[in-house]
Image: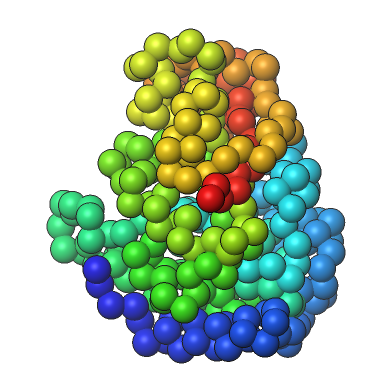
Amino acid sequence: MKKVAIKNLLLAGAAIAMLGTGGVALAKNHAQDGMVHGAADLPAVLKHERRSGDKARDVHRNPDQTLTFFGVKPNQTVVEYGPGGGWYTRILAPYLAGSGQYIAINGDSSSDTFSDRAREARAKGWPERFPEVAAQWTGVAADKIMAFESDELPDAMKGTVDRILIFRSLHGMLNGNRADSELRALREMLADDGMIGVVQHRAKPGASYAMSNGSKGYLTQESVVALFELYGFELVSESEINANAKDASDYPGGVWTLPPVLSQGEKDKARYEAIGESDRMTLLFKKRD
């Protein structure tokens, strides 16, 4: 386990102190480009011009309905696991900036192997680098954004998280052989009444192992529910918000055949664009005693 940056520890301490007063204290709103962050207005966040490059995906990812289904509120402490390029970060960080807390979590890099020192340095420096990057994406001050690896969350913050959101990255946990450590760590983060929301590429029921083991990006809904049950969760609710019946879920190149990646390039591009993004399960879990 590598040490957490001093800056992040100081930020965590401030957040813990605020949580100890009975809720996350109201932070100063940050106004930029005509928008006041933390206005608790999700439609305004979704319509903001900062998302001009993201809005085309809304028809497939249904962020308003998805976050409503997960019960995300602007005064909550919310973890986004594996934020990647920040599509949901650009929604969540501004939405939570006023009276909540956005926390980005990546997997434990100490369990990874790297092809060179530069790649290793970039991976291990992510918690220190991400708040500044997310601030540029969102206009939210960097000191309002926290980032940790899953093994680095300060002990005092464990049991304080209202929602953990895992968007289309559960297969990455499995492919990296880290589902055990990650799901145990995520469970520790949750408050007693906290919940985990999962959106994941969905394989067809009875799909072959090769098509449903995560290597193609797809998992069966049954296997995801079973996995979470194994790690002390129970399914609260499920939704078809992000379903796509056009997705056959059987492409040799995996889910990346479809938008937005379109890994086949110009080959059958019109066909895959007509299908749209993948069929996805949308599941909400709570901790089981």
Q: Is residue 158 left or right of residue 165?
A: left
Q: Position of residue 136 (x, y in %)?
A: 57, 71
Query: Which residue is painted at 82% across and 68% down in the image?
Result: 40
Return the residue nearer the eye: 70 or 139: 70
Q: Position of residue 285 (x, y in %)?
A: 60, 44
Q: Quadrant of the N terminus?
A: bottom left
Color encoding of the figure? rainbow
Q: Is residue 254 left or right of residue 113?
A: right
Query: Which residue is painted at 39% across and 53% down in the image?
Result: 184
Q: Is residue 258 above or below residue 267?
A: below
Residue 7: in sight, yes or no?
Answer: yes
Occupied quadrant, residue 97:
bottom right
Q: Is residue 212 above or below residue 57?
A: above
Return the residue nearer the eye: 121 or 172: 172
Q: Position of residue 195 (x, y in %)?
A: 61, 53
As drawn, the residue found furthest toward the left would be 116
Q: Position of residue 132 (x, y in %)?
A: 50, 75
Return the residue nearer the eye: 4 or 159: 159
Occupied quadrant, residue 231:
top left
Question: Total of numbered circles in the picture?
Answer: 0
Query: Which residue is painted at 60% across and 48% down in the image?
Result: 286
Residue 58: in sight, yes or no?
Answer: no
Query: Which residue is painted at 40% across and 58% down in the image?
Result: 185
Occupied quadrant, residue 109:
bottom left
As drawn, the residue found furthest toward the front would be 289
